[in-house]
Image (tube, rainbow, N blue to C red):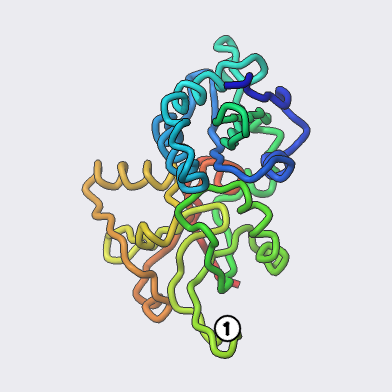
Amino acid sequence: MNELNLLACLSSLSPREFLESKSCGAYTVIPLTSYGALDLPFHTFRLYESFMSVFPSRNDCIASFAYSLLRSLTLPGIIIDANSPNQRSIVTILAGVNNVDGLELHCQSNSFDLMLGAPIQDSKSTAVDIQAYTRSYPKVKVSSWPTERKSIERLRPITCSETIMARYETLNDKVIGMYDLTEGLTSNLFITRENQLITAPDDLVLEGSMARLVKRAAAHIGVLTSTEKLSLSKARSWSGAFLTSKTVLCIAQCLPIVSIV
């Protein structure tokens, strides 16, 4: 395959701008520290699954996929100096195809700290709004999603830092009601009820690496985690709710929801 394309170390482009500057493909965003990449096997497998969903006929790329992904993380400008324990970055990897030799990976690195806005970084909770919307590819991390979600973000009240998508009913092409919550635009949603963690069914959401870690931690301490449709009609039975995300929104933590605007 061709040499991997590297934009720049600590690029001035945000991950969204980077993805929008490239042709459509599958992508993942990996937090990287001097101790290694966060949950690299998960990101490798999810990127591969997304790639095969976007390009189902390109199974000729299978053999080189994992090797190419690992190699991209060791390119000059991406790898982190092990002597700088406080250094953190976000590595965005986009997997696409070309007409010459198949798989083509593009990657760039952004400073983790420079990406974070102080108000969100210091926040211990958040307010959210709910919008009737269903992703075009709910199970695939595809690079068109940052552009697709712009229309929803424009509707978000200034007091909210995330939008929760909901499945909806229509009549004559007009939304007449919302019924099941699914996930945030850049996060996963968890509900607490009777000492249980509940999240939307797997076929409706794209599970993130932090959501997986939350489920593992819950199992470790004996807290039951289940999936079910998060019906708004049952909201009064919920004792709480929180979001998980590995990057800008939650700073790789759980962020409690205090209000719905």
The one of 78 and 148 positioned closer to us in this rendering: 148
Pointer 1 local density, CA inside 10 Å: few below 14, some 14–19, many at least 20: few
Quadrant of residue 44 within the rendered picture: top left
Quadrant of residue 93 within the rendered picture: top right
Residue corresponding to mark 1: 175
Residue 15, percent from left and from top:
67, 40
The answer to whether 97 appears left or right of 48 in the picture is right
The answer to whether 221 appears left or right of 45 in the picture is left
Residue sticking out furthest to the top:
83
Residue 72, percent from left and from top:
57, 22
The three-letter amino acid code for the residue at tag 1 is: Val
Residue drawn at 60 percent across, 59 percent down: 162
The one of 1 and 215 positioned closer to us in this rendering: 1
Residue drawn at 34 percent across, 75 percent down: 237
Residue drawn at 50 percent across, 71 percent down: 166
122 vs 1: above or below:
below
74 vs 226: above or below:
above
The one of 168 and 219 positioned closer to us in this rendering: 168
Classify the position of the C terminus by image quarter.
bottom right
